[in-house]
Amino acid sequence: MTKELKKSKKELEFEQKIGELTNDLQRTRADFENYRKRVDAEKDMAREAGQINTILKLLPVIDNIERAIAYLPEDLKDNAWAQSVAGLVKNLEKSLDGMSLKRIEATPGTEFNPDLHDAVQVDEDAAGEHEIIAEELQPGYLLNDRPIRHAMVKVTRQ
C-alpha cells in the first residue's frame, strides 16, 4: 500500500507540475501577445508622429505660396509662370489630401469651434450670442480627423 501511495503521490505531484508549467506557458503566450500588440501600436504612433512632423514643416511653404498668389498683381494673372506657381499649391494639396490631410473649415460666417480654431483676434464691440469667424488669418489642418494645426481666426459675435 505504501508503494501505491508513493506512486499516486508522485503522479499527483507530476500533474501539479504539469498544471503549473501549462499556466506558465499560457501567461508567457499572453505576455508575448500583449508585447506584440504594444510594439505594433508604438510603430503606428511613431509613423504618425513622423508624418505629422513632415507635414508641419511643409505647411509654412504652402502658406507662403498661397500668400504670394493672393497678392499677385492684376497684370500678371494670365502669366504662365504665375499660373504654374498656383498649380504648385493645388498639386501639394492633392498630395497631402492623399495622406488624409484636410483643411479646417474657417470661412467667414462659420461657427467658432475652440477644438479646431485659435481666436487670435476678437471683435470686442460686436454683440450677439454666437461666436462666428469673421476672417481666417491662417489655415488649419486635420490629419485623420485630428487637428495638427488649428486655424488662426478673427472672431466676432452674431
Image (cartoon, helix red, strand yellow):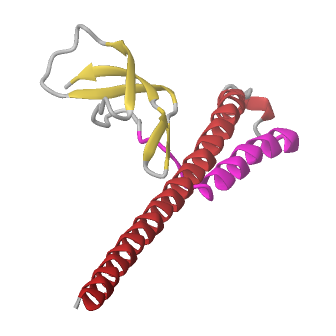
Q: Which residue is drawn at 12% across and 25% down?
A: 129
The answer to whether 127 is drawn above or below residue 1 in the figure is above
Range of magenta residues: 78-105
Q: Is 35 or 149 nearer to us in this picture?
A: 35
Which residue occupies the foreground of this view, 15 or 151? 15
What residue is at 25 percent from the left and 8 percent from the top? 124
Count every numbered label the image shows and give the total.
Answer: 0
Q: Residue at x 43, y 44 (%)?
A: 146
Q: In this view, does 129 lie to the left or right of 111?
A: left
Magenta-drawn stretch contains 149? no
Residue 4 horizontal/vertical position (percent): 27, 91
Q: Is residue 22 left or right of residue 45?
A: left
Q: Where is residue 5 in the image (x, y as percent from the top left)?
A: 24, 86
Image coordinates of residue 45 in percent, x first then y, are 55, 47
List the single residue furthest toward the top: 125
Quick one: 16 or 39, which is closer to the camera? 16
Secondary structure mostly seen in the magenta stretch: helix
Q: Is residue 45 found left or right of 51 in the rendered image?
A: left
Classify the position of the C terminus by image quarter. Answer: top left
Figure quadrant of residue 40: bottom right
What x and y, as percent, mark residue 89?
70, 43
Q: Is residue 95 magenta?
A: yes
Give the quarter of the image for residue 75: top right
